[in-house]
Every structure is written in structure tokens, then in C-alpha cells.
Image (cartoon, rainbow, N blue to C red):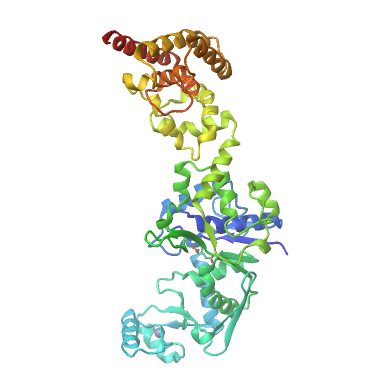
Amino acid sequence: MQVRVRYAPSPTGLQHIGGVRTALFNYFFARANGGKFILRVEDTDRERYSTESLQDLYDTLEWLGIKWDEGPVIGGSCGPYVQSERFELYREYAQKLVDMGKAYYCYCTPQRLEELRKKQEEEKSSEQGYDRHCRNLTPEQRAEYEKQGIKPVIRLKVPTEGSTTFHDILMGDITRENKDISPDPVLLKSDGFPTYHLANVIDDHLMGVTHIMRAQEWIPSGPLHVILYEAFGWEVPQYCHLPMVMGKETDPVTGEVHFAKLSKRHGSTSVRDFRKKGYLPEALLNYVSLVGWSYDGDREFFTREELENVFCLEKINKAPGVFDYQKLDWFNGQYIRKKTDDELADLLMPYLCEAGLLKETDRDRLVAFVPGVRERLVLLSDAVGMCAFLKDQGEPAPELLIPKKMDAAGTLESLKAVYGYIRPALEKGASDDEMQNSLCELAQKLGIKNAGVFNPLRTAVTGLAVSPPPFSCMRLLDRAEVFRRIERAIKVLESCSKER
Ligand code: GLU
Ligand code: ZN
């Protein structure tokens, strides 16, 4: 049997961590078993549908490098893969169920249903939901409703006795008393639109889905779906409901730690947000795959290709997985360190351009700068703050330029000597190490500490007390600008040593 799995999101919002984890587990499971990964767009809820969400779905999967074998855009033998393009099919199959006596037309008006609901509420009745009023209408009654022009819905006949069981690979057997299942839910609405249950079951069957891997919150729908499969006479696929993704919360008063379903309260949840902040797809994919799954409990680093080989259901944790933002940051830093200077420059460029700090044509200088900050970056967007010195901070204040235990005259002497060395050194392409050594020698010659040489240089070039290493900064700035800033600082020192 070839494994066929699907990710079936509803495009009603941005792709979030939980959804993406479901997509990844399905994708990896398909790959690891030589199966097919299907993408299906469940857009039956036309009110909550948005094209932005659909685009976000495609962008997210592309960014993560997840390619579907069948689905929208690329098609496949079971298409179309967008539910709104399959409405005719759902009508046909709903009618089949009616013809087989497994479903029926219901002519109840919204008003009647509303009155029913109120009555049940007032009487605190144990009967909840639809009262199966139309389940056994006579042909004459039906004809009468039809004559009145009432457009019926189609409802599923849920058995009133017995129980329904389905097997879940992780959770084992899950049984529900039939009387506790929603009494005869609507399958097809009066406007001919299917409900989630109908479309989902028909599509999973027609698309040959063998394993249904989805979030645990869908467990309550399980028994109903099994009843539907059985009504059609179809084989029930295997279920594997995935444990929830939780966020960690610390009570600000008691300091107690507890967990709740991951939500915006805990931080960003949409992949788009993570992407904007400068998380790398490799890092997000790696970390999200470890939320509720592990290889041997020890190994942490996995590329997408590796997960495509080693993923298996047996290693999915039964307990909810905790999404740890700090751990993701750590992964991101690790993956940034693996980038070459060129790769990292390309990744940082958009952030620096958007901040108005660099232009595309400055790329070579960025490549030369990158080694100075690689180790300090957690997010790509951190580079914006680190490059604040690119904006001219204006004439530096003497207090900033003059190191502790030095005076204006001494600092002036030092900076002049530094400039005398640095200018030709940069022009002839000296390395950081060369410059570092020469400046240390210079400090010795001047009889001052190394800081007395390096700090004025840093402040002269960046205008800031804190910045990336001064040599890196000098490589990122335009050369003429470096010299201009140092000369300007020399003038500041000159005028204040004259004053004294
Ligand atoms: N469209 C459903 C969702 O948005 C799919 C649930 C399922 O996988 O069956 O999660
Ligand atoms: Zn009815």
C-alpha cells in the first residue's frame, strides 16, 4: 500500500506554528515511506476565506522548501484539490447517501431550529441539538414542503444506539456512544454548499488518503467521520491525531509555570512573523519538527533532507509539545553561524536596504563586514541595530572620544598615529589581524594601553560607544566616509586640546 497523506488547511488565516508542524509531519511521513504528500485547500467556509491566507499558505510552504506531490497549482490525478471547485461532487455524493437511506432531507426553517434551541435551553433538556424532526417524513409531507418552495438541507442519519470506535495510532482506540454524537448533522446546506465533515470525508476517500494526521482538536469529529465512511461503505483511513503545541506561561505574581495552547499571548505564532524577524527556514523547520517528535531524544540537528529519511510516527510524543521561543532563537543562531560570508550577506541585505542603511551596490562591503557580526546574530534583523553606525551620528562628543585616564592631547596623538597607519593599511588591503597587531605595537610605542588606541578609533568611525568590531565597521562604511569621520574626530580633539 502506498502511503498517501494530506495537509488540508482552511485559508482563513495566516499559517501558524501548529499548522506548519502538521504539514511537516505529513510531508516527512510521506517522504520517509516513499509515499505522496497532497495539499488540499479546504475553502468551504466562504465567509472566513481570504486570498491573502491562500497566498500565505503557498509562500510558507515554499519558504520551508516543502513541495507537494499533488495539489493546487500543480494538479494531480485526484484533482481539483481546492474544495470550492468540487461542490458538484459533494452534492452528488450527498444525494447518494439519501438514495441509500443513510441521509435525509430536512426542511426545518432557521426559525424552527432557533425555537427548538430556546426550548431545550429553557427546559434544561438533556436533548441537545436537532430533534430529528424530518428523519421519517412521509412522501406526502415531503411533497408538501417542496410545494412550499422550502430548500432542504441534507442531514446524516447518526445511529441512536450503540457506539462508534476508531483507532488512533498514538491514542489507541477511541470510543464514543452514538447518542452523544451530534444528532444528525448537516452534510449539505440548503444553498448546496457542503459542510466540513462531508467534504473532508469525501475528499480523503477519493484522494486515496491512507493516513490522516491532523491536530488533536479534531478528535471529536472522528466518530462522526467514521459513521460517514461506513454509510458510504468506504474503508476508514488510519488516524494519527497529533498532540497539541503548547506555550509556556509564567505567572507574574506567583512565578508558577504553566502551559496553554500556543497563542499570540506567548509571542509570534504566524510563520510570516518569524520570517519577517529574520528566522531562517532551516532553523524553524528543524525546531518545529522537534516539538512533539524526537529521533533518539538526543540528536537535535536535522536538515530537511535528513528528516525526509528518518521521520517516523513511533517517535511522536503522546504528551503535548512545548514551543520554546528561546530554543528556536538558539537554533537560529546556530544556523546563521553555518552560513558563508556570501550567503549571510545575501540574507542580511534586504533588512539593511529596507532600513535605508545600505544599497544593493554595497554588497561587497557587506560581505567583508559579515565575519565581524556572524557570532552575535540571533535574528537576521539584529543586523539593523548593529549597523546603526552607518547613519552618521554627527560630530562625536569629546567625552566619548577620550578614554578614561587619558586627556584630549594624548587621545589626539593616538588617533593621529592610528590614522597615519590605518589609511594606507586599508588602501593596500591589510587583513584584520595585521591591523590588530600593528595597532597593538603602536600602543606600546606610545606607552598607552591598547584601549587608548582602539577606543578613539571606534568612536571616531562609528560615533557610538558600542558597535561591532571597528575593523568590521570600517569595511562596511564607504572608504572615503571612514577617512572623513576620523579626520572630523581629529579636529574635535584638536579644538579641545587647544581650549585647555
Ligand atoms: N480544514 C481543516 C483544518 O483547517 C482540516 C482538518 C483535517 O485535517 O481533517 O484544520
Ligand atoms: Zn428538519
Res 30 visible? yes
Residue 219: x %, y % from top left: 54, 72
- Nearer to us in this view, 196 or 175: 175
Please give the name of the residue rendered at 54% of the width and 87% of the height, measured from the top-left corner.
Answer: 159
Please give the name of the residue rendered at 51% of the width and 11% of the height, measured from the top-left corner.
Answer: 442
Q: Looking at this view, name the residue that lies furthest to the left.
A: 499
Above or below, comparing residue 250 to residue 134 in the picture: above
373 left or right of 129?
Answer: right
- Nearer to us in this view, 8 or 25: 25
Above or below, comparing residue 84 to residue 146 in the picture: above
Residue 379: x %, y % from top left: 49, 40
Above or below, comparing residue 337 to residue 211 in the picture: above
Residue 114: x %, y % from top left: 32, 81
Res 80 visible? no
Please give the name of the residue rendered at 33% of the width and 23% of the height, measured from the top-left corner.
Answer: 393
Residue 247: x %, y % from top left: 47, 59
Please give the name of the residue rendered at 41% of the width and 9% of the height, measured from the top-left corner.
Answer: 413
Q: Looking at this view, name the residue that lies furthest to the right.
A: 1
Tell me where residue 97 sits by quadrant.
Answer: bottom right
| Quadrant in the picture for the C terminus | top left
- Nearer to us in this view, 77 or 6: 6
Report how many numbered discs are placed on residues in the image: 0
| Quadrant in the picture for the N terminus | bottom right
